Amino acid sequence: MVNLAEELRTRRDYARAESLNVLSRRFSPGAATGLGNATEMLLDQGKVNEAAATAAPLGQISSWYSAYERIHVLYAQGEESAMRTLADSLVRHGEGIRHSFGVHIQRSMSLRTTRLPRGPARPFQIWNEW
């Protein structure tokens, strides 16, 4: 059902694709893909409040997927402090992909605010030594 919804999405038939994604939860209550895709489609259409409501149940299914969609909703809402809090939490308490995702968010936020982490004085010095 999710695959059919994605096909409809490529044809810009958003209403039917969204319906199929939400409906897929009834047939596969343990799968988060349909809700995640519906959240992304709502964000693409500028429906931020509806996207936040659709993404809310993801936390019960998959904490990783929930964090992934939540960061997009927070970005659309302009909630930079909440984004930083989520990223810090993922870096401190996450393992594997969660930790990496938190680091990625932190780096992206640093680039947005031009607060880059301190690194070597000459980043290309390593290449010159070879």
Image (cartoon, rainbow, N blue to C red):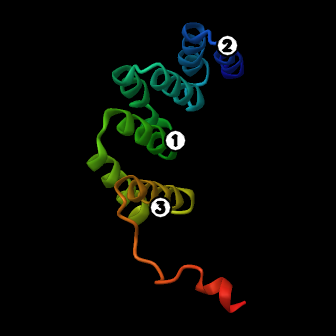
Picture coordinates of residue 9, whole percent (x, y):
64, 17
Seen in the picture, residue 71 relative to 114 is either above or below; the reply is above
| Residue 93 quadrant | bottom left
Question: Label 2 sits on what residue type?
Answer: Leu
- Callout 2 touching callout 3 (CB < 8 Å): no
Front-lying residue, 126 or 102: 126
For mark 3, does the 10 Å Cα neighbourhood hold few (<14), some (14 to 19), or many (20 or more) residues?
A: some
In the image: residue 50, left or right of residue 12:
left
Disc nearer the start of the sequence (2/3): 2
| Residue 106 quadrant | bottom left
Quadrant occupied by the C terminus: bottom right
Q: Which residue is mark 3?
A: 103
Picture coordinates of residue 121, whole percent (x, y):
46, 84
Seen in the picture, residue 65 relative to 118 is either above or below; the reply is above
| Residue 60 quadrant | top left
Question: Label 1 sits on what residue type?
Answer: Tyr
Front-lying residue, 59 or 102: 102
What is the CA distance from the residue labelled 1 to the residue labelled 2?
A: 22 Å
Q: Which mark is residue 75?
A: none
Q: Residue at x 71, y 22 (%)?
A: 3
Q: Which residue is mark 1?
A: 65
In the image: residue 59, left or right of residue 22:
left
Q: Residue at x 68, y 12 (%)?
A: 11
Disc nearer the start of the sequence (1/3): 1
